[in-house]
Amino acid sequence: MPDPMLPLLGLSPVSGKTIVARFDGGMLSSDGGVVVLREVERRLRVAARMAACIKDPRAPDQVTHSLADIIGFRLLMIAAGYEDGNDASSLRGDPMFKMALDLAPSDRELCSQSTISRLENLPDARALLRMGRAMVDLYCESFRQVPKRITLDIDDTFDAVHGGQQLRLFNAHYDEYGFQPIVVFDGEGRFITAVLRPAKRPGGKEIRAFLHRLLRAIRANWPKTEIVLRADSHYCCPEVLDWCRANGLGFILGVAPTTTLRRHIEGLEASTKARFEAAPKEGKVRRFKEFYDGADSWSRVERVIARVEAGADGTDTRFIVTNLSTRNARVLYEDVYCRRGQAENHIKSWKTHLAADRTSCTKATANQLRLFLHAGAYWLMWGLRVSMPKRSAWRVAQFDTLRLRLIKIAARVVEMKTMIRVHLPASCPEQNILRFALGRIPRLAT
């Protein structure tokens, strides 16, 4: 271990004066904003919900770190940008992380990396099923009132692996081994669930079984809420269409173009292209057409909407299928279906900003738990973001921006007999927004 009393070499003088820098500041932290995330976690109780799903085999009288404390520490680490469990070895003594877990700075250290690794390998398949149900319950309880209608954005995302993990599979499109978990958000960006699976396109029967479990969990909380399924053409399978109709779900799904579908819009494509060529300076021309048709594998014809767009690069046509009652085809495509693009941003926040692709455990159950842990960290950052002022840039800020501006704040901690003082930089530019967020966090629905 490096000696903290050794000076940091290589620093140039300032105003003719030598700089002497050592890592001997005492109770200092570079994550002063973690205590704000603590308040979000206390409202949402993410760690306690997840811990309740796991049976603790340890002797109660010899437990130092409860499962909720271990999970809570891991969630805070991920949210603060420490995606590897190895970082716990350095952060277990950090005064701000201790305070975030209800410990005084002078109390015992937090759990180590080895304790976190044992936790990741502890749950079995039944515990993970309970945890998936708990994540859905967390989603449902995040609303102040039972919504009349929700939209489920379902998608899958590639997760490259570099070892002998269970469930890994070679994907020719990405030319790599990996997983392809299914992830579900709602239309407002709330995380609902994630399921680890091999790196291949999901089939109709697999999607139907997944949706059946998800619907049962949601209906247990909201038996009368209208549910709309929104997804790309990967999920437009006859099994999914029939299941949605049988269970009263609305759907709006992308459809891969076929010769049969294109036959309906050949004339529209030609006239749209001619209209653009007649006035190219006016920009792209977009037109819509709806008709009823279906693939041979479908049990019935469905309402299909075609979007034809002509521009300098030629003609581009997209198809969607829906059972929604809205009559205007343009509104259905542009205002309803195209909003599923936001799901890509939510997946980016989860994978890129919270490193949800760190699925390097050998066991599939451990990697599934990691998906849930990173989902829990997503909820902490989501809770922080929705506490921001409405119609402000903070309300749509990326998670890495929130982390850099609101969590990565230097702090000096002074523990006294009846008080703990946290000294934050006087030059911190985000003082007002932190005060605002702390005033709004207690109003989060739980």
Image (tube, grey):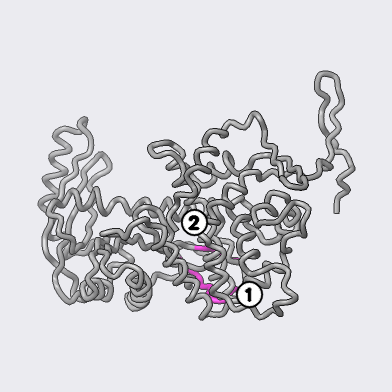
Q: Residue furthest front?
A: 418
> Measured along the vertical axis of the image, is residue 281 above or below residue 191?
above
Image coords of residue 26 (percent x, y): 81, 44
Q: In the image, residue 119 lies at what x, y percent?
A: 64, 71
In magenta stretch: residue 188: no
Considering every residue shown, the one lying at the far top of the view is 15
Q: Residues within 10 Å of mark 2 (few under 14, many from 20)?
A: many
Q: Which residues are magenta?
A: 159-172
Q: Is residue 110 left or right of residue 239?
A: right
Name the disc covering residue 160, or none.
Answer: none
Seen in the picture, residue 425 relative to 382 is either above or below; the reply is: above
Residue visible at 19% across and 71% down?
Answer: 295
Nearest to N terminus: mark 2 or mark 1: 1
Q: Main secondary structure of the magenta part?
A: loop
Disc sitting over residue 379 in the figure? 2
| Foreground tag (2 vs 1) | 2
Q: Quadrant of the C terminus?
A: bottom left
Q: Position of residue 441 (x, y in %)?
A: 49, 48
Could you tell me which quadrant the N terminus lies in? Answer: bottom right
> Depth check: 103 or 29 in front?
103
Which numbered circle lies on residue 121?
Answer: 1
Callout 2: helix, strand or loop?
helix
Q: Is residue 418 left or right of residue 362?
A: right
Q: Is residue 167 magenta?
A: yes
Residue 364 appears in the figure: no
Q: Is residue 415 visible?
A: yes
| Amino acid type of the residue tagged 2 in the rendering | Trp
Instruction: Decide which of 322, 140 is in the foreground and name it.
Output: 140
The kind of residue on which mark 1 rests is Asn
- Characterize the local packing of mark 1: few (<14), some (14-19) or many (20 or more) Cα atoms within 10 angstroms: some
Kind of element beneath mark 1: loop
The answer for how far apart the CA atoms under marks 2 and 1 are is: 23 Å
